[in-house]
Amino acid sequence: MSKNREIGDIFDTMADILDLLEDNPFRIRAYRNAARNIRELTVNIEDIVNRDELTKIPGIGKDLGDKISEFIQTGKINDYDKLKKKVPEGLVELLGIQGLGPKTLSKLNKELGIKNLDDLERALEGKKILTIHGMGEKKVEDIKRGIELLKHSGERMPLGIALPLAEEIIFEISKIPGTEGTIAAGSLRRMRETVGDIDILTMAKNGEEIIKAFTNLSPVKEVLAAGDTKGSVILENGTQIDLRVVEQESYGAALLYFTGSKAHNIKLRTIALEKGLKINEYGAFRDKEKIAGKKEEEIYKTLELPWIPPEIREDKGEIEAALDSRLPNLIELEDIRGDLHMHSKWSDGKVTIEEMAQKAKGLGYEYIAMTDHSPSSRIARGLSVERLYEKKKEVEELNKKIKGIKIFMGSEVDIKSDGSLDYPDEVLKDLDIVIASVHSGFKMDRESMTRRIVKALQNPFVHALVHPTGRLIGEREAFEVDMDEVIKTAKSLGKALEVNSYYLRLDLNDINVRKVTQVGVKLVISTDAHLPDQLGMMRLGVSTARRGWAEKKDVVNAMDLKGLSKWLKEVRKE
DNA sequence: GCCGTTTTCGGCCCGACTGTTTTCAGTCG
């Protein structure tokens, strides 16, 4: 685990403990804010400590800066250890129970001696808990439900699962009479790689009726809340859906507000206050007068800001960039001219090259690269040199047969543990495109892995490094590698790094993409499709790239056929 | 605990929903 993440987690836990101790809420927020900023940093916190620039990080002042230095130097934070002794260990994790907050928990601890989940569950079965001020039958049921939810809900859902699910629900809600402009908000609209619950916004006058109809939709298992502007339900599969109903006059303000991120909104509201305005989910107000609300653009305009794309609303410099008129011109799905990473029946894909090509052509692509696996990937039926040349012949024939799309003959070549590639150079040179990746030996130490990957990139025939960190969302951590070194190598050789669009990969992730685009290294956004339909995952990769501020000029497969062909050759000349 | 063209103290985003309240606290996003 990176130090950034470790420190982020510690600060968050410290915030939780301070919450239970009913400390100053603004101090607690400072810890949470710092945690988030450190976790999402694009550089290693150690480097910042070495440069003595900690207080340049937003939300880090002298005190938190000292704590970070202490952790980097000694591996621990004294104040954290002291704080941990003040509350029972099991109490902090109970904060994860929906409906049970720090105030109630602290009371339960003081008055009933509840220290952990076991204690809590036992108390909920008894009568004594009802004697506590503010506790009633319903509250008890609420907490029980919260515990069940925590036990079963588990992890955040990958974007690739949440997105189609949300689209189905939106379709259902759109059918409720009186609704208009139904749209996903929240982290889904920002296209975060995982989504906690699904937020949906709709425009209607008769809020109460809409919410009632919503809570009666067929996949709804449980209703958590149902007012006249807000409803929350749990679906059969355990997903929570929140629906908000607003009137047309407030649609833009509500969309802005419910899209978040929270940090982005807080900064916007702070700027509003400086201008003597107030922003809430109903609009922008000067004194009591509403001056904007129908559209997001209007709200931004009252702050003298251009509209900011949802994917970058994370308070990571986008508001400052907007103020300076230097917002990035983000890559769009429509900019993508081809897909350079996919598999066919020749290795572990499910259909023929021709079927993949036809599907790609249907998507309007100008080109694809067929990149089946190399021999070391036995499980994926990697091609022997002999079969590779047979496949090359098929590609040549298909290029004559199918008009309107160019098929590049390629390979996804394994990077062996010593950094050498799985085909000899005299074979690689016969391929139009070579993408290299790690498929084994994930547990290597950081230095060896970095050396391994850098060496592979240095092979003159390699065009791109694909799924560069090997992570699988919710299943496998990224392997240890010095990404800065990899980026530096790619930069010096003019090679590309992939944003793999497969929904469990999204690798590079948004944070790494941002690093890459900051130094001007090329990206290739591809799907790694094993089925024709998986070519559609491109939108996930493009969104990830957008979250990393990638522009069209950063992406090699946003070039037309001519431009890309030229790039493929140029890489090998350097 | 952080932050600053109303700077080194006094602020710190804002509203909905719920349950237990008789005017509001707690939780959530």
Image (spheres, rainbow, N blue to C red):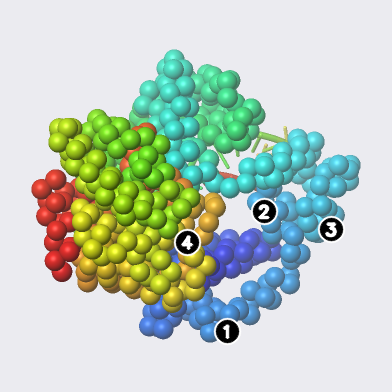
- The amino acid pointed to by label 3 is Gly
Please tell me whether mark 2 sits on a helix, a strand or a loop. Answer: helix
Q: Tell me the CA gap for discs 4 and 1.
A: 34 Å
**Crowd rating for badge 4 (residues with CA inside 10 Å; few <14, some 14–19, many 20+):** some
Question: Which residue matches tag 4?
Answer: A440
Determine which of the numbered discs, if any, sits on residue A190 in the image.
none
Question: Which residue matches tag 1?
Answer: A74
Horizontal and vertical percent position of residue A256: 37, 41
**Crowd rating for badge 3 (residues with CA inside 10 Å; few <14, some 14–19, many 20+):** some
The earlier-in-sequence mark between 2 and 3 is: 2
The earlier-in-sequence mark between 4 and 3 is: 3
The earlier-in-sequence mark between 2 and 4 is: 2
Q: Tell me the CA gap for discs 4 and 3.
A: 50 Å
Looking at the picture, do discs 2 and 3 lie on one chain? yes
Instruction: Report which quarter residue A126 is drawn in.
Output: top right
Horizontal and vertical percent position of residue A29: 53, 61
Q: Can residue A564 be seen in the rendering of this structure?
A: yes
Please tell me whether mark 1 sits on a helix, a strand or a loop. Answer: helix
Please tell me whether mark 3 sits on a helix, a strand or a loop. Answer: loop
Q: Tell me the CA gap for discs 2 and 4.
A: 39 Å
Relative height, residue A555 to residue A421 (above, below) = above
Q: Can residue A27 be seen in the rendering of this structure?
A: no
- The amino acid pointed to by label 1 is Thr
Question: Which residue matches tag 3?
Answer: A113
Q: Does A362 sit left or right of A124 as displayed?
A: left
Question: Which residue matches tag 2?
Answer: A95
Callout in the foreground (2, 3): 2
